Image: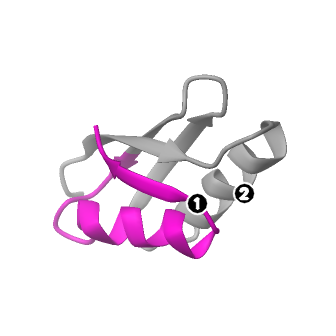
């Protein structure tokens, strides 16, 4: 099993819990993502992922696909 890293993303455009859940679901569909937790109140999303399978840029792209903005925090 490969190592797991944690990325913190500053996520923009989150207005409610449903927004956070959409971001989490999109991230958890990405191969190599172990878990994701997004908080619309703080605008932060924490992602545990396998860096040999997925990059932080891939994680940001997943958030953008969900309709929100993101950058590494």
Badges 1 and 2: C-beta atoms under 8 Å apart? yes
Residue lying at 64% horizontally and 68% vertically, measured from the top left: 67
Reading the image, the residue beneath label 1 is 68
Tell me the colour scheme of the image: one colour
Instruction: Tell me where residue 23 appears, x and y as whole percent.
Output: 63, 55
Cα–Cα gap, marks 1 and 2: 10 Å
Residue 32 visible, this orientation: no
Left or right of residue 48, residue 52 in this image: left
Above or below: residue 27 compared with residue 58: above
Q: Residues within 10 Å of mark 2 (few under 14, many from 20)?
A: some
51 relative to 72, above or below: below
Which tag is nearer the camera, tag 1 or tag 2? 1
* Rendered location of residue 72, percent (x, y): 27, 46
| Quarter of the image where the N terminus is located | bottom left
User: Residue 61: x percent and y percent?
Assistant: 41, 72
Highlighted magenta segment, given as a residue range: 48-73
- The answer to whether one can see residue 65 in this image is yes
Residue drawn 38% across and 63% down? Answer: 59
Q: Nearer the viewer, residue 31 or 26?
A: 26
Residue 14 location, x and y as percent?
67, 44
In which quarter of the view is residue 15 placed? top right
Q: Nearer the viewer, residue 1 or 42?
A: 42
In the image, residue 60 lies in the stretch drawn in magenta: yes
Q: Quick check: 69 left or right of 56?
A: right
Quadrant into which the C terminus falls? top left
Q: Nearer the viewer, residue 35 or 27?
A: 27
What residue is at 63 percent from the left and 68 percent from the top? 66
For mark 2, what is the residue?
Answer: 22
Asked if the magenta segment contains residue 22, the reply would be no
SS of the residue under disc 1: loop
Q: Residue at x 20, y 57 (%)?
A: 2
Q: Quadrant of residue 33?
A: bottom left
């Amino acid at each position: 099993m490969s190592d797991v890293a944690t990325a913190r993303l500053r996520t923009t455009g989150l207005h409610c819990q449903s927004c956070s859940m959409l971001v989490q679901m999109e991230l958890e569909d990405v191969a190599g993502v172990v878990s994701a937790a997004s908080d619309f109140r703080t605008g932060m999303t924490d992602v545990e992922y396998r860096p040999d399978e997925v990059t932080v840029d891939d994680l940001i792209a997943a958030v953008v696909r969900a309709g929100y903005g993101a950058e590494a925090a």
